Amino acid sequence: MKKIKEVLTFLVLLIIIIIIVNLAYTKIILPKNKFYVAEMQYQEYIKNEKSINFAIFGESRAKNSMNPKFIPNSFNFANGGMNYILIYRRLEQVIQKDQVKIKYVVLGYDLHTFSSKMYEEPNLIGDLWFWHRLISSEEIHNFSGKSYFQIFIESNFPFIEGGDGLESFRKSKKEEIKKIYFGWDPLEGNFSSINQTKAAIKDYRLHFLDIKERISPLGIEYFKKTLILAKENNISIILIKYPLSESYDKVITEKGIDKDEYYQNLSIIVNKILKDYPYEILDYSGVYLNNSEYFADSSHLNSFGAEIFSKKFTEDMKSYTFK
């Protein structure tokens, strides 16, 4: 009996400690998470504004490249590793739950966007403290293979996932956390000052080495859903191939990455769904091949490059009527 009481006392103390640690994490560390900061900015934005001209979705290239300061009435919903499962659910939330009217949706359309790596653990769905509100536990279980208990724990006790919030908190003691502006996350650094070939090979390996499929069926399924959702809500669609450095472009060419076949396969899908519907595919992949100083690494623009690119995008939009 005494042993049972000791075990019960220990379990109660453990639960209390977990609750206290989780509360401390959500109040002190999670607010340092860049995704959390961007979400708070969005919630503040829609208190007074229920329309967005340019709703930007995608992974890190979109997040770092598209600065809403230079794109009128825009919000950057992109996040590192954001695949089309997450894009679809987030767009659905903005349109249906938040009742925000979107004029243009801007979607990533890069060479690794539909890679099976984007649709496998651990890249599939992170930040469950947020996404469990938009994606059912059953879906998360089916996508990721995580048990319902694991999903519950990670969704309700975000300190267990740790991640970006903890890292940002650690860094904040040494330097000011970079300012998030309407979801835009500025990158610093100058790619021209480092070994560009070595860095490009590293990024190539990250995106293309040991992938099972260049185009994931799961990714395509949710890409189609996203296009249909935009179409049903009369939102004009912009598909963007983001700028690449010359070194990265050279490496993926040398490694035999077939751009033409990849985009031909995607074009068949897009044309079938969006026949007679307003959309544009904007290829910016080669626009800054001779400007390595615009990049923080081989495929991400730094804050200087993002300003230049965002201004260019805004100016280019004046040429498209989407009729």
Image (tube, rainbow, N blue to C red):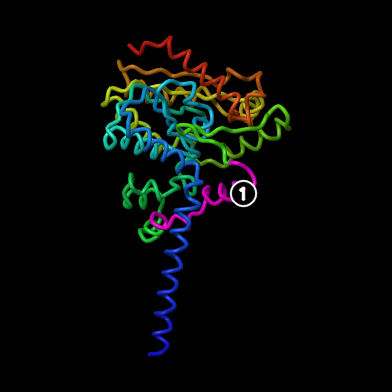
List the residue tagged with mark 1: 173
Indicate the quadrant where residue 317 lies. top left
Q: Which residue is farthest bottom?
A: 1
**Crowding near pointer 1: few (<14 within 10 Å), some, many (20+)?**
few
The residue drawn where x is 30% and y is 15% is 276
The residue drawn where x is 38% and y is 56% is 156
**In the image: residue 285, left or right of residue 55:** right
Q: Is residue 8 depicted above or below 273 in this figure?
A: below
Q: Quadrant of the N terminus?
A: bottom left
Indicate the quadrant where residue 145 lies. bottom left
Q: Tell me which amino acid carries mark 1.
A: Lys
Image location (x, y in percent) of residue 298: 63, 30
- Foreground residue among 267 and 136: 136
Indicate the quadrant where residue 152 lies. bottom left
The residue drawn where x is 31% and y is 37% is 93
**In the image: residue 189, left or right of residue 144:** right
Image location (x, y in percent) of residue 323: 32, 11
Image location (x, y in percent) of residue 107: 42, 27
Image location (x, y in percent) of residue 86: 39, 39
- Foreground residue among 226 and 293: 293
Number of on-image labels:
1
Residue 157 magenta: yes
Q: Give the structural element (helix, strand or loop) at label 1.
A: loop
Q: Which residues are magenta?
A: 154-176
**In the image: residue 132, left or right of residue 115:** left
**In the image: residue 16, left or right of residue 170:** left
Q: Main secondary structure of the magenta part?
A: helix
Residue 162 magenta: yes
